[in-house]
Image: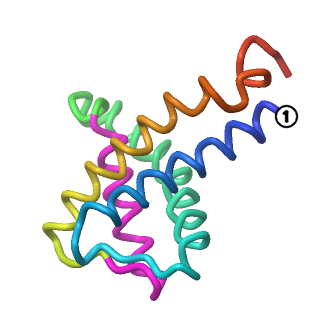
Amino acid sequence: MVRTLLTGVLYLIANAAGLFLAMLILPGFKIDFTSFVSTVALFSLIEVFISPLLTKISLKNMPALSGGVALVTTFAGLWATSYFLAGFEIGGVRNLLLATFIVWLGALLAGVILPMFMFKKYLGNRKD
């Protein structure tokens, strides 16, 4: 139970890092200070629901796409989140495409690096 909870927290932190990185790099990519937490939560929730669906579709119909499911999921998550939240602005198609890669890469790096320093005790060899 603890491991699952910490994995979820780590996922949220990794997505927050990716979104924050996109805010720093891309002009026009804006998240209001007050909307940041809700943006990260909604973006992560959308990704959690879309990812298994896209994985299943890609394995059944387009096996070559299975390696890019994370990028497609990030793209769909960014677009859907911007549609539902007023405090989140992508700033155009160019920013959406660039933000997809930046958020994916930032979340990937944070997801790899953070467990080495945080939650090591629980995410290591412990079994729940």
Q: Residue at x 34, y 33 (%)?
A: 60
User: What kind of colouring is applied to the model shown?
Assistant: rainbow
Q: Residue at x 79, y 24 (%)?
A: 122
Does the magenta segment cover residue 86?
Answer: yes
**In this view, 39 is above or below 122:** below
For residue 80, side relative to residue 102 (left or right): right
Q: Position of residue 118 (x, y in %)?
A: 68, 32
Quadrant for residue 124, please give it: top right
Question: Where's the N terminus, which quadrant?
Answer: top right
**Dividing the picture into quarters, in which one does residue 66 lie?**
top left
Q: Quadrant of the C terminus?
A: top right
Determine if the magenta segment contains residue 72: yes
> In this view of the protein, which residue sits in the foreground, 78 or 12?
12
68 relative to 5 in the view: left or right: left
Q: Secondary structure at mark 1?
A: helix
Residue at the outermost bottom position: 86
| Residue plotted at (71% across, 23% down) | 120
| Residue 42 drawn at (x, y percent) | 56, 67
Residue range in magenta is 68-89
The outermost residue toward the top is: 125
Mark 1 — residue?
2
Q: Nearer the viewer, residue 54 or 7?
A: 7
Determine the main secondary structure of the stretch shown in magenta. helix
Count the marks. Answer: 1
Q: Residue at x 61, y 28 (%)?
A: 115
Category of crowding for the residue at label 1, using alpha-carbon neighbours closer than 10 angstroms: few (below 14), some (14–19), many (at least 20): few
Q: Is residue 123 above or below residue 25?
A: above
Q: Amino acid at mark 1?
A: Val
Q: Nearer the viewer, residue 66 or 62?
A: 66
Side of 78 relative to 44 (left or right): left
**Image position of 46 with respect to 120: above or below:** below
Residue 41 drawn at (x, y percent): 60, 64
